[in-house]
């Protein structure tokens, strides 16, 4: 193994490896040239010595080099989260992606099935009738014709099969829970990314600052949500022009009443899918409010709104005009075409 001597000796000494050494190790793993024990040792070693923004940045670059890309000419945005909150909410980022598409954005929504939660993006969309087993070309067509396409992670990151057994055996959240959401197969340079803890928010922001992104918000709700929350304030790291700016966002500042986590709880895919359909049909609820706020921020990041109030107006219009629901219907149609 090309990384045994360097990287494992660093771990044994309680030292964090340099990013170059880590990149060599990760390349070896993603080529399928490491044993499950070696993968586990790498992940546990990083857990012990701690991550750095440089390690995360190199990890994303390496993941991108091994992925099956989606080629989209349009200026796209992704709305994605790390998951792992344990809060089992309704499908917030999925609904926000559809609302943004209805408002004119081009959304390349990267995601997967649920890992620790009851329902992931893929589970909800599959329940709604979206075909997940599509080619990169078909995914690009969905973005072009529906305004939104779903990039199912296993279709685009086949090398991740080499780390699956070790991750499952360890049963803990690892570096890959950060790298996945950061590695959009369509190369989105505008992103709204939710994380489930503040340490990751800061690390991810510094890593994104070195990845030539256009505009990214990394958000963490005060309730632990990996979304912009409506139960209290949300901490935001904004990455723009290679610099990081810290913000604090309060829903009341935008006329949105505080909600409770209980009012945002979801369930199994059928339950989340039905709630999403009701939202798209105009039902007013705490779920609608949190989707509107996340959509507003995403529309601003996408360059389609000058600020969150304008983003809210566009998001409300996308739902109430039926354009968000139309985006879902078109996504279903094109994904099966």
Image (cartoon, helix red, strand yellow):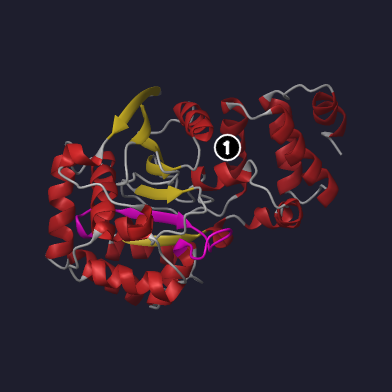
Q: Name the residue under label 1.
A: 61
Q: Is residue 276 above or below residue 307?
A: below
**Placement of the N terminus among the 4 image quadrants:** top right
Q: Is residue 139 visible?
A: yes
Nearest the eye: 252 or 59:
252
Residue at coordinates 42% horizontally, 67% vertically from top-left?
138
Say left or right for 87 vs 142: right
Is residue 229 shown in magenta?
A: no
Which stretch did the figure color magenta? 101-121
Residue at coordinates 38% horizontally, 75% vertically from top-left?
128
* Residue 175, image x, y percentages: 63, 40
Nearest the eye: 211 or 266:
266
Mostly what secondary structure, the magenta segment? Answer: loop
Q: In this view, does 242 lie above or below 265?
A: above
| Res 162 → quadrant | bottom right
Residue at coordinates 31% horizontally, 30% vertically from top-left?
248
* Residue 33, image x, y percentages: 81, 48
Is residue 112 shown in magenta?
A: yes
């Amino acid at each position: 193994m090309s990384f045994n001597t360097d990287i494992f000796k660093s771990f044994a000494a309680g030292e964090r490896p340099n990013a170059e050494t880590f990149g060599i190790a990760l390349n070896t793993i993603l080529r399928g040239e490491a044993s499950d024990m070696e993968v586990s040792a790498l992940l546990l070693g990083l857990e012990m010595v701690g991550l750095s923004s440089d390690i995360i940045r190199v990890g994303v670059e390496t993941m991108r080099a091994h992925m099956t890309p989606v080629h989209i000419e349009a200026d796209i945005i992704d709305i994605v989260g790390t998951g792992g909150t344990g809060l089992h909410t309704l499908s917030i980022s999925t609904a926000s992606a559809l609302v943004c598409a209805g408002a004119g954005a081009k959304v390349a929504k990267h995601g997967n099935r649920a890992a620790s939660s009851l329902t992931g993006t893929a589970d909800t969309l599959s329940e709604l009738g979206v075909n997940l087993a599509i080619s990169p070309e078909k995914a690009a067509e969905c973005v072009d014709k529906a305004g939104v396409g779903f990039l199912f992670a296993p279709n685009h990151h086949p090398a991740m099969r080499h780390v699956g057994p070790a991750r499952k055996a360890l049963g803990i959240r690892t570096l890959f829970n950060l790298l996945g959401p950061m590695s959009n197969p369509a190369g989105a340079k505008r992103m709204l990314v939710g994380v489930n803890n503040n340490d990751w928010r800061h690390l991810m922001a510094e890593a994104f600052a070195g990845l030539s992104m256009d505009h990214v918000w990394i958000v963490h709700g005060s309730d632990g949500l990996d979304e912009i929350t409506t139960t209290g304030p949300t901490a935001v790291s904004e990455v723009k022009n290679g610099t990081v700016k810290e913000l604090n966002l309060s829903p009341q500042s935008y006329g949105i009443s505080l909600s409770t986590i209980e009012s945002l709880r979801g369930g199994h895919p059928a339950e989340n899918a039905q709630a999403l359909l009701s939202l798209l049909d105009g039902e007013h609820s705490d779920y609608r409010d949190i989707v509107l706020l996340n959509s507003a921020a995403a529309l601003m990041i996408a360059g389609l709104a000058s600020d969150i109030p304008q983003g809210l107006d566009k998001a409300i219009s996308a739902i109430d005009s039926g354009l968000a629901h139309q985006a879902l219907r078109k996504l279903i149609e094109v994904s099966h075409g």
